[in-house]
Image (spheres, rainbow, N blue to C red):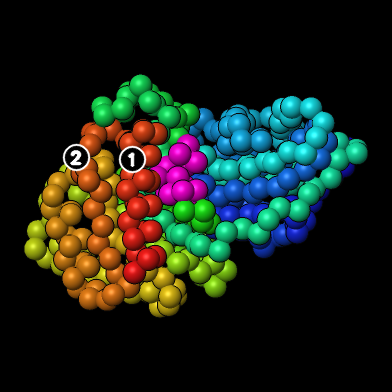
């Protein structure tokens, strides 16, 4: 079989991926991907997987058809079905968030196969900060549209590919980086991520953001988005072991920290437009008003406030694929309106 090293320039990557070893890229954030075209009738990935929790699957799209790759082979070898000899396109992507991270070691093709050159990645770039909705958690539980989550699902319904963020990128023909983690809130010691230990204030500037591994800084010069969506606030009512509304002092501290992170990102991305928003997952109007105040406080033409038609009202459970599609269509329309101004 022909061996392709991950450093091959014909491979295209998207997402915050660790390339400290170019032949062992490490995928952390949901939605991170590698794509390529190849000839032949054989495709094998050699993947070193690092488990944190729950059932683990990668997503793989071959010639437009989506498959799942269940991780767990002892020899780290994953054979991907290919429909006969010919020219094919593959996208391998991380479906889930911090349930695991994985290292791509090799790609194996037929002896007579090879990589083909793809068109360049789109020029338009998005970056989407958020929680489980942005990461695509539980989207595939389509039997639960508009209702609460299944009592047990072990992450098998998670799929970042169908999150509003990645759907919006495809509708706009854009690249996208997801900086999204289920259960995350703005502050450390609030929300649900890692039992509430870590928030977006710690994670937003990280490459590896996993608590069980050494955290590493992200090099913001590697990716300069045109539009940044910031969907944080859904989990922030949970602290000290219970859900509660912020008092006046806590509210002010939240606003100050939220705006400080935005200001830091605005400095790192001097040409980007920032979109402050929440999602259609049910939440108190308090948080929408808080984002109104944050937008007013930033007082910049580069900071916009956007609400989905059913923001905070559509479902008590995670948005499923149809609801994520609804959000993607509305967000695409809004971003296109900004691009024409």
- Secondary structure state at the residue bearing disc 2: loop
* Residue 336 image label: none
The residue at the point 58 percent across, 43 percent down is 93
| Residue at 40 percent of width and 38 percent of height | 137
Q: Position of residue 337 (x, y in %)?
A: 34, 60
Which residue is labeled 1 in the image?
A: 326
The residue located at (11%, 65%) in the rendering is: 249
Using the rendered image of the protein, determine whether residue 52 is visible from the camera's viewpoint. Answer: no
Tell me the number on the disc at residue 313: 2
Majority secondary structure of the magenta segment?
helix
Q: CA distance from mark 2 to mark 1?
A: 13 Å
Q: In this orientation, does residue 224 appear? A: yes
In the figure, 311 relative to 127: above or below? above
Coordinates of residue 203 in the picture (x, y in percent): 42, 59
Residue 121 % position (x, y): 61, 58
Screen quadrant of the C terminus: bottom left
In screen coordinates, is 104 left or right of 220? right
> Which of 207 and 333 lies nearest the eye of the viewer?
333
Question: Where, by quadrant of the figure, is residue 314 drawn?
Answer: top left
Image quarter where the N terminus lies is top right
- Residue 165 magenta: yes
**Start and end of the magenta stretch?**
159-171
Q: Are marks 2 and 1 in contact (CB under 8 Å)?
A: no
Q: Position of residue 312 (x, y in %)?
A: 20, 44
Drawn side of residue 4 relative to residue 148, left or right: right
């Amino acid at each position: 079989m022909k061996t392709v090293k991950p450093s091959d320039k014909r491979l295209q990557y998207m997402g915050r991926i660790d390339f400290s070893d170019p032949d062992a890229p490490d995928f952390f954030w949901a939605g991170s991907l590698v794509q390529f075209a190849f000839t032949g009738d054989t495709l094998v990935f050699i993947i070193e997987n690092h488990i944190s929790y729950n059932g683990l699957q990668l997503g793989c799209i071959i010639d437009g058809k989506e498959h799942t790759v269940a991780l767990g082979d002892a020899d780290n070898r994953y054979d991907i079905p290919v429909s006969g000899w010919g020219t094919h396109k593959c996208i391998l992507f991380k479906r889930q968030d911090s349930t695991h991270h994985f290292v791509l070691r090799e790609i194996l093709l037929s002896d007579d196969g090879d990589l083909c050159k793809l068109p360049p990645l789109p020029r338009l770039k998005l970056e989407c900060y958020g929680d489980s909705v942005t990461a695509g958690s539980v989207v595939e539980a389509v039997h639960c549209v508009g209702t609460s989550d299944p009592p047990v699902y072990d992450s098998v319904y998670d799929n970042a590919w169908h999150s509003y963020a990645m759907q919006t990128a495809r509708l706009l023909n854009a690249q996208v980086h997801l900086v999204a983690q289920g259960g995350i809130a703005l502050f450390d010691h609030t929300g649900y991520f890692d039992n509430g230990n870590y928030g977006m204030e710690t994670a937003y500037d990280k490459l590896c953001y996993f608590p069980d591994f050494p955290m590493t800084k992200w090099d913001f010069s590697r990716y300069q988005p045109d539009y940044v969506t910031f969907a944080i606030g859904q989990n922030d009512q949970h602290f000290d072991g219970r859900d509660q509304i912020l008092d006046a002092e806590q509210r002010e501290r939240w606003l100050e920290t939220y705006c400080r992170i935005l200001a830091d990102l605005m400095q790192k991305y001097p040409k980007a437009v920032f979109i402050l928003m929440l999602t259609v997952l049910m939440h108190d109007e308090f948080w929408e008003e808080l984002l109104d105040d944050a937008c007013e406080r930033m007082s910049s033409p580069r900071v916009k406030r956007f609400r989905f038609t059913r923001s905070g009202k559509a479902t008590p459970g995670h948005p499923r694929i149809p609801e994520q599609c609804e959000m993607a269509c509305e967000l695409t329309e809004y971003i296109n309106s900004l691009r024409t101004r």
